[in-house]
Amino acid sequence: MKRSGKSARSRVWLSAAVLCSFLLIAWLFCLPRNLFKGTQYSSVVLASDGTLLGARIAADGQWRFPEEKVVPEKYELALIEFEDRHFRIHPGVDPLALGRAIRDNLSAHRRVSGASTITMQVIRLSRGKERTVWQKLVEMVLATRLELRCTKDEILALYASHAPFGGNVVGLSAASWRYFGRSPEDLSWAEAATLAVLPNSPSGINVERNRGKLLAKRNRLIERLYEKGLMDRTDYELALEEALPERPHPLPELAPHYVAYCCASNPGATTATTIDASLQKRVSATLDRWSREFSQNGIADLAAVVVDVHSGEVRAWVGNADLKREREGAQVDAARKARSTGSILKPLLYCASLQEGLILPRTLLQDTPVNINGFSPQNFNLRYDGAVPADQALARSLNIPFVRLLREYGTAAFHELLGKLGMSTLTRSPDDYGLSLILGGGEGRLDEITKIYASMSAYYQKELPESADFPLHDRAAIWYTFEALKEVNRPDELDLRMVKSARKVAWKTGTSYGFRDGWAVGVTPDYAVGVWAGNADGHGMPGLVGGRTAGPVMFDLFNLLPPSDWFAGPPYGEYVMAETCRKSGHLKSLYCDECDTIALPAAALRSEPCPYHKPVRLTADGRYRTDSPDAGARQVNMFLLPAAMESYYRKNHSDYESLPPRIPGSISDGETVPMEFIYPEAGSVFTVPRQLDGKVRGIAFLLAHSTPSETVYWHLDGSYLGNTRFNHSMTLNPEPGDHVLTAVDGSGARIQLPFSVRN
């Protein structure tokens, strides 16, 4: 019998042990790994200081911000005092509160107290079950398990993230912004207390319903906080005086287009940005003011980007201004939209050409009419200088010199350079863009181009990461580029002296074909600012010129920024000293008389010496050239441009001396050719140009002679065509095929131009 009793007791203990083990295992695994799995959150975008830039509602129609990580102290103290005074010491269930609730409910013969701890409420929020006695027991069990898994602070954060605050507002952050227009960290005592009591009965008591009851509950909580010494007398009195919010606030929309992009890129999460909220507000206000003015002239849209040079971070972003003015295209983020670049890429070609030694800062570039296989660009002012220093060509944004420079640099090489600099929009082949790439034939994004200018400034100041493979790597070339851009003063656009800013800014404007896009991008050692003006639908407007629209806006934005010093330079130890011709800007040749010694990019020594200064033997009176050793004949070094360049250059330079004619009776030596075809160029290929009525329009040929009064005789394929004097131009209608045009002057000098005509 004793053995049987012992055996029975053993079985009982074994069964109890098995049961306990089962219950323990069940308890350990009773809690889902992710309590709020499947919960949909709002997309939230924050400024650099945590200010809310904007948000997008969750897919289920709730303003439910992503989960909190930390609960602010004021709200934590208020919540614990109101909901669960023993929260920090109980294991998920408060026995004292539970006993009190049972007593009170039995006495009242109805449910007057639930005894739910904050931990139990987290469980209830995660399960969404009806409130019953059985569910309460389940919540108690799960609450004890949650206490084992999470710290008290983590449990508080879960509650703060998922508690209902009335209407479609869920979670502390959403409630704080909706009801008070600020982040939870900035709540006052009264505001924290209001949000602590709201989840207790959000459907029956809220800021718009039963406000008296809400106020009374809030004030009782404030009194308890004061009595416990958690707030001082001044805070207590001020808190009692604070009014409740009248209604939910609309959420901030400080950078709507930027917010929309961030929310689409990172849905249902919080995106921390580098936007400066204070600067963003001021930039937006400035653009709204300018946009209202531009809209009166049919220019509907305006965008701007501000980039911090030192960090490369975006500090302000206005994708489109004045959104209150209803119009098509208002929602287009023009700062991210690819648009025709106009002239905004010219500084990059100038800098790259300096870096490669193709030009020096003041090298004379040819500025004469050009027709390259039907491509006939013109300067904005429809005038020609013949020859212009490279830095002036950049400052004045002359088109023809840069088309010629791009042809020398190479379209494919420049296309590749732009890709390495960060332009993602040039998706076609270099041949598709051709030489028009430098005049807006390609498209660019305002944000990318502004960042390129910022990177140039950062690289010059040695602030780019060492791992950055920045293709414009010659700091002397960058410095000369900024120096040229500092002098921007386009006569066709904006006189810098009219701009209300004394700051030094390296800036460039751009205007696309058809007046569809106006650009201005400027840079200092600290900031880069890019502005675009136009119409989102792409239609042009007369007066939509970069310097008259985007330019003034850009300077207004620079006036919002802290002042900057100018770039120190050229960079010591990263340049070569060399003598350059004062007139041509090239390296000094044997025949250059007036020279300057300047610091140049390292590759400058690869560039050619001055090709324009030449020794010339003149008669004693200087009127004629001669090869004769006559007494009194003398040799001088003359600055002589090719005939095409000279014909335009001397109109603007009264001190220019043309090459004197050969002494009467002498024959051309064949070395000095006094004339040159301006256009077309040798080897040009034409299709037969026809007018609307089908008639052949003809091809115009233009020639320059150093002595315009000289008679020039024209021949096509050996057949005489006629002669010209003063105005050396002729329009021809050659048959399809290959041809040679020959021009001969009275001294026997001749030039030939091969070209082809196709059907």
Image: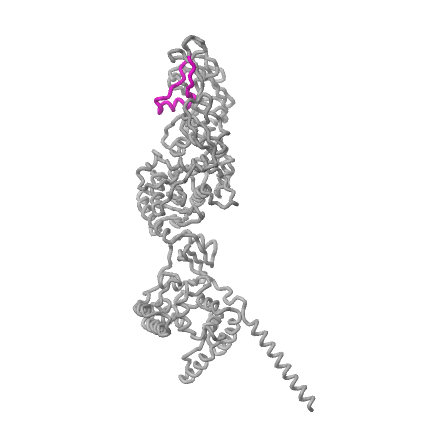
Give the camera-side residue of 608 and 426: 608
Question: Does the magenta-highlighted stretch encompass residue 44?
Answer: no
Q: Position of residue 604 (x, y in %)?
A: 48, 31
Which quarter shows the N terminus?
A: bottom right
Q: Quadrant of residue 226?
A: bottom left
Q: Report the colour scheme.
A: one colour
- Relative depth, front residue between 739 and 660: 660
Q: How many marks?
A: 0
In the displayed structure, 218 sits above or below 584; it is below
Q: Where is residue 335 shown, x and y percent of the image? A: 41, 46
Residue 565 visible in the snapshot = yes
Q: Position of residue 297 (x, y in %)?
A: 31, 42
Relative image position of residue 183 (x, y in whole percent): 39, 61
Boundaries of the magenta span = 634-662
- Tell me if 482 is positioned left or right of 149 in this view: left
Residue at image x 51%, y 29%?
A: 606
Q: Is residue 659 above or below residue 514?
A: above
